[in-house]
Amino acid sequence: MTTTSQNPRRTNAWTSWHGLPTLDVLEAILGKVLVHERRGRRTSGIIIEAEAYIGEDDPACHAAPGPTPRNVPLYGPPGRAYVYLNYGMHYLVNAVTEVEGSPAAVLIRALVPFEGLDLMRRRRPGVRDDRLCAGPGNLTKALGIDLRHNKSDLATGPVRLEDHGFRVRDVAYSTRIGIRVGTDRLWRATASIED
């Protein structure tokens, strides 16, 4: 489902998740809207897939080796973006979740395009609309998110999480994908948007 809107419902930023346990955020983030606003243009999508990465004991979490210059955003404060370059090719965006000092985040893996479809198409030419934001590297390219947005406030920054009242259905949990360790945890959530 691809949605477009000439006059989207404007709401306050979604902040009720700050400091909550990451698995609670994983469920709650489905149906929220990831927005990037730049030069008066908005691109956004409804979150339909995400994964949790929790703490230094999670071997797939970037915090597993302890604090480093790269992973410092994971340690808080909550409500910030953790954006990094994956394998030198794709930017990935995460929402830092738990209280400061407890490294954890939710990786946003897929969106249903909501606003700025024309701009997304220019950023990803030749890609079908339903694939523009399929995958964590594809969605950041479509929305124009990169390392400049690392550590930015997801309530007030140019990259934000908003609640537009979308409801989800068919929520399913499975193992995380694209990793080689920590594959036993059912910390990947997917959903469909209710019509």
Image: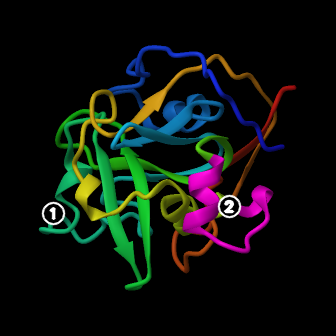
Q: Amino acid at mark 1?
A: Pro
Tell me the SS state at disc 2: loop
Compare residues 105 and 83 and report the one nearer the observer: 83
- Amino acid at circle 2: Leu
Which of the marked residues, 1 or 2, is nearer the chain's N terminus?
A: 1
Q: Nearer the viewer, residue 5 or 74?
A: 5
Q: Which residue is found at the position 39% from the left and 35% from the top?
A: 160
Residue at x-position 64% and y-position 57%: 133
Picture residue at 64% right of the left edge, 16% below the top: 165
On the image, the x and y values in percent for residue 64 come to: 30, 67
Where 61 falls versus 54 (above or below)?
Answer: below
Q: CA distance from mark 1 to mark 2?
A: 34 Å
Quarter that holds the C terminus: top right
Give yes or no for residue 65 being in the magenta stretch: no
| Image position of 117 with respect to 126: above or below | above
| Residue at screen point 59% across, 57% down | 120
- Dividing the picture into quadrants, the one containing residue 86 is bottom left
> Which is the main secondary structure of the residues drawn in magenta?
helix
Residue 46, placed above or below residue 107: above
- Disc tally is 2
Residue located beneath label 2 in the image: 132
- Lateral position of residue 7 relative to residue 173, left or right: left
Q: Which residues lie in the magenta part? A: 117-131
Q: Is residue 187 visible?
A: no
Residue 127 colored in magenta in the image:
yes
Q: Which residue is mark 1?
A: 67
